[in-house]
Image (cartoon, rainbow, N blue to C red):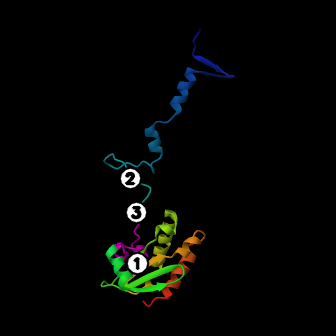
């Protein structure tokens, strides 16, 4: 067998010399970095900047106006003892789809909690309902008086027709149960 520096592949002939010429045209990594100065900008000490294309903007005024729509931990009911106190000692408002328990608290904060039993549906449905309820509270905080704890539980009837409902329908149901309580 005879070896040569030429390969003949279906009317395509290439030599080693042509391959070496082609490899010389490929830019190195350093050349590419220099070509893309926005992506790879170096500091004076030789290190690259983390995100040279993105500069931090001051949005203090915008975040202050949105702060009233937040849902910080201080507004959440998550201790079992607090929830039991609300259920046993507070008021109740009932609709066909929700049960709402409410009680005045010692603090000057509105607090909100929601729970779903496993009978309501699978984890996706339970988490979606809890997300919708928290979102309703977050957007409508002003409707709840200061110093009140509110705890919501869905009823079994809602579980059967929850799959096709969106946030708007759930928000209407929560408004209905909210209108029935004396806060």
Task: State left or right for residue 124 relative to residue 9.
Answer: left
- Magenta residues, start to end: 57-78
For the residues labelled 1 and 2, the Cα–Cα distance comes to 40 Å
Helix, strand or loop at mark 3: loop
Tell me the quadrant of the picture where the C terminus can be found: bottom left
Task: State left or right for residue 183 relative to residue 172.
Answer: left
| Marking on residue 50 | 2
> In this picture, is 183 found above or below 27?
below
Mark 1 or mark 2: whose residue is earlier in sequence: 2
| Marking on residue 112 | 1
Q: Residue at point 39% right, 68% down?
A: 58
Q: Residues within 10 Å of mark 2 (few under 14, many from 20)?
A: few
In the rendered image, which residue does mark 3 sit on?
56
Residue 110 shows up from this direction: no
Q: Residue at point 50% right, 72% down?
A: 132
Tell me the quadrant of the picture where the N terminus can be found: top right
Mark 2 or mark 3: whose residue is earlier in sequence: 2
């Amino acid at each position: 067998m005879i070896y040569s520096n030429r390969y003949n592949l279906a009317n395509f002939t290439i030599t080693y010399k042509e391959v070496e010429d082609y490899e010389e045209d490929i830019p190195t990594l350093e050349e590419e970095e220099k070509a893309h100065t926005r992506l790879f900008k170096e500091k004076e000490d030789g290190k690259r900047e983390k995100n040279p294309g993105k500069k931090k903007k001051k949005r203090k005024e915008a975040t202050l106006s949105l702060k009233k729509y937040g849902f910080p931990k201080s507004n959440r009911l998550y201790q079992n003892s607090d929830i039991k106190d609300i259920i046993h000692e507070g008021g109740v408002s009932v609709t066909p789809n929700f049960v709402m328990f409410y009680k005045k608290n010692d603090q000057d904060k509105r607090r909100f909690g929601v729970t779903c039993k496993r009978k309501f549906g699978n984890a996706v449905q339970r988490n979606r309902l809890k997300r919708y309820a928290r979102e309703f509270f977050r957007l409508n905080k002003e409707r709840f008086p200061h110093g009140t704890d509110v705890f919501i539980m869905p009823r079994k009837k809602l579980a059967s027709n929850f799959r096709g409902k969106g946030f708007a329908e759930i928000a209407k149901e929560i408004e209905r149960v909210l209108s029935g309580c004396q806060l």
